Amino acid sequence: MKTIEDLDKVITIKEPENDKFIDIVSLSDVNTTMKKVLPLLICKQIYDKKKQIRNKEKYLNIIIDEAHNILSYTSQRESETWKDYRLETFEEIIKEGRKFGVFLTIASQRPSDISSTIISQLHNYFLHRLINNKDIEAVERTISYLDKVSFESLPILPTGTCILAGLSAKVPVVIEIDKIDDGFEPYNKTIKPTEYWGSPQHHSTLRNTCPVY
């Protein structure tokens, strides 16, 4: 199977290291299939291990960034059986994991692509600005903690602010997120084309690409 061949390229089996405070797994260099398979295998393994240990003094928090790539309920690259198993695994973690000390934190710009069962089981939400109608509808359909005023403000939230809703807040509240200190922020700022319009490089690009009529 091609999936097994792809796994051989990215997985190396070796002796386990001592417990670490945090482990970071980057999927930036793997193909789309592995972006769904690897999180399933890793999370299933550490979840089952935590269930067996049952140490109440330690907890496990699984944080999934760009969760729409991993927890999506639509997929053209995997069978229905494999997709169901993937979603059922994460749905079990979010529904049953708390009693074993396992918690799930997800971050996504496309909530409409994530399983509604997973979204509805979350206890706290930090909702930044949403523009896409499908994403807004998904939030309205699955999040019961949001009132009408907060829901209607989602498309117009300023940059750097979000709505906190859930068990940690008695009512939805708008909060401002502190900026990350210089040197630690990710390289993800939006490029402003107008800042480069006067540069020689920009004029050179225009000369090479603009058609002549």
Image (cartoon, rainbow, N blue to C red):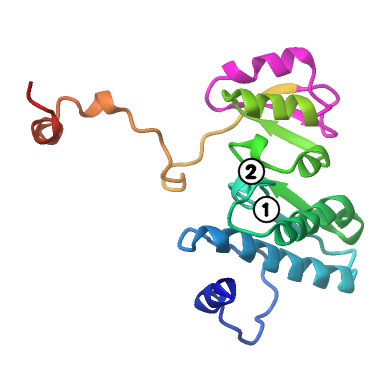
* Quarter of the N terminus within the rendering: bottom right
Badge 2, how many Cα within 10 Å: few under 14, some, many 20+? some
Residue 91 drawn above or below residue 158: below
**Residue 171 quadrant:** top right
In-front residue for pair 6/213: 213
Among numbered discs 2 and 1, the one appearing first in the sequence: 1
**Residue 164 quadrant:** top right
Q: Residue at x 15, y 25 (%)?
A: 198
Q: Which residue is disc 2 drawn over?
A: 107
In-front residue for pair 189/91: 91
Q: CA distance from mark 2 to mark 1?
A: 8 Å
Q: Residue at x 60, y 31 (%)?
A: 177
Residue 196 drawn above or below residue 96: above
Expressed as whole percent of the image width and height from the top left, the position of residue 17 reads: 65, 81
- Span colored in magenta: 143-172
Q: Residue at x 81, y 72 (%)?
A: 49
Expressed as whole percent of the image width and height from the top left, the position of residue 167 reads: 85, 34
Q: What amino acid type should be assigned to the residue bearing mark 1?
A: Ile
